[in-house]
Image: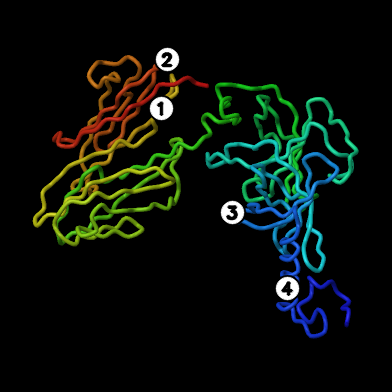
């Protein structure tokens, strides 16, 4: 038998006389499958989203196990679900001719936070009160300084964005990241945490245990600016104009999904360009990030005119501050120029309000400024066009400064 100078798993040529790589891999796999067949420590686990048969062995350290799998069965940082618990592969796997092995450690928390786009992220994590002084293979333990903790989480596209000063709530206590290490351990992110003792129910969701939740969680709103109804004839097309906001901030270049209630009446492409097929009525649904809105399109032999309008601006104003609002007008879902008229009422839509006033309005440029008073509550901003055929209103909250 010819022994090669390089490790077998790094070579692309002959491993042993008469064996090519694929042949040798198949031989090794058969050998490991035979081992799985006789081992009382063989289990079916979930790695990523796939079921795999592995061998799991106890070690001398609590919550730490040794895992053996077929070659390339997992990598450092993978989350493994075994016996209703989650584990993280803590060490780069070691190889022999038939299998790979490593250590996995049981996760005791889900690390949760709101990311920069306002979405909740949650990943199984190992949270240490004490930490081994020389790796998970040893029993030697050191105490972390008072108020300090360590957390280890899988390295992925979300966790590598974690930075210093990021806050977490763990076990009802607030912690702040004081150091981040993406380099020392392959596939892992190591977080050094310091107890911050600054829980705040105004910004932290204490029930979900997510820090900096309020005013950071995504609040997507999708709006079809053509209005809620449009009419076209069989010779016309219609371009839907859709905007998306997140916490009242416009989302640039959102990818909108469109669907039709009746594909016999019209077709629509990924840009919102609608073509009629036959007379009838169809609802178009525009969806972004699980938030949807609809417009009804009537396709007729001849054109009947329908007028709608829209108020563009934020849904809240801080007390004592001023916000500008603009108007758009649509005829059969297509924007056209018209003159605007704004007015304010109480939240009931009828009564006079003392919570805000209109500072100025420009009927030609279709804009107005709303000045909030010092009292908190809700007002209604009303809009109509010159002949009153198009009307709408917007509910606005007068909120605290902080």
Whichever of labels 3 and 4 marks the residue nearer the N terminus, that label is 4
Model colouring: rainbow
Q: Nearer the viewer, residue 25 or 37?
A: 37
Q: Residue beneath label 3, please?
A: 49
Q: Quadrant of residue 384?
A: top left
Q: Residue beneath label 4, please?
A: 25
Q: Alpha carbon of mark 2 to alpha carbon of mark 1: how far? A: 14 Å
Judged by depth in the image, the label closer to the viewer, 2 or 1, is 1
Whichever of labels 2 and 1 marks the residue nearer the N terminus, that label is 1
Q: Residues within 10 Å of mark 1 (few under 14, many from 20)?
A: some
Whichever of labels 2 and 4 marks the residue nearer the N terminus, that label is 4
Disc 2, SS: loop
Q: Alpha carbon of mark 3 to alpha carbon of mark 4: how far? A: 24 Å
Discs 2, 4 touching: Cβ within 8 Å: no
Disc 1, SS: strand
Whichever of labels 1 and 3 marks the residue nearer the N terminus, that label is 3
Q: Residue beneath label 2, please?
A: 374
Disc 3, SS: loop
């Amino acid at each position: 038998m010819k022994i090669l100078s390089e490790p077998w798993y790094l070579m692309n040529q002959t491993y042993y006389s008469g064996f090519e790589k694929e042949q040798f891999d198949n031989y090794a796999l058969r050998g490991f499958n035979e081992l799985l067949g006789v081992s009382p420590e063989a289990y079916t686990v979930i790695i990523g989203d796939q079921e795999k048969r592995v061998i799991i062995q106890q070690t001398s350290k609590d919550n730490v196990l040794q895992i053996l799998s077929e070659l390339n069965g997992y990598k450092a940082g993978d989350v493994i679900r075994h016996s209703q618990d989650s584990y993280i592969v803590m060490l780069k796997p070691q190889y022999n001719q038939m299998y790979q092995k490593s250590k996995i450690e049981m996760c005791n928390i889900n690390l949760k936070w709101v990311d920069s786009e306002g979405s909740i992220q949650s990943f199984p994590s190992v949270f240490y009160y004490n930490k081994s002084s020389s790796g998970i293979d040893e029993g030697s333990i050191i105490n972390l300084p008072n108020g300090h903790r360590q957390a280890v989480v899988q390295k992925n596209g979300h966790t590598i964005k974690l930075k210093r000063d990021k806050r977490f709530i763990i076990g009802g206590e607030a912690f702040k990241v004081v150091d981040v290490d993406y380099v020392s351990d392959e596939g892992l992110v190591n977080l050094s945490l310091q107890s911050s003792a600054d829980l705040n129910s105004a910004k932290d969701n204490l029930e979900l245990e997510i820090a900096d939740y309020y005013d950071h969680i995504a609040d997507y709103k999708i709006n079809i600016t053509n209005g809620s109804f449009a009419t076209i004839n069989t010779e016309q097309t219609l371009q839907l104009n859709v905007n998306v906001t997140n916490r009242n901030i416009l989302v640039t270049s959102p990818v909108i999904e469109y669907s039709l209630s009746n594909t016999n009446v019209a077709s629509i492409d990924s840009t919102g360009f609608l073509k009629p097929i036959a007379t009838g009525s169809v609802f178009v649904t525009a969806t972004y990030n699980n938030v949807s809105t609809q417009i009804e399109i009537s396709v007729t032999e001849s054109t009947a005119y329908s007028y709608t309008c829209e108020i563009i601006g934020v849904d809240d104003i801080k007390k004592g501050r001023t916000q500008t609002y603009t108007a758009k007008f649509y005829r059969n879902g297509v924007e056209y120029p018209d003159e605007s008229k704004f007015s304010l009422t109480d939240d009931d839509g009828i009564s006079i309000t003392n919570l805000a006033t209109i500072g100025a309005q420009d009927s030609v440029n279709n804009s107005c400024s709303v000045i909030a008073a010092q009292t908190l509550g809700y007002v209604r901003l009303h809009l109509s066009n010159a002949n009153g055929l198009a009307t709408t209103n917007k509910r606005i909250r007068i909120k605290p400064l902080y």
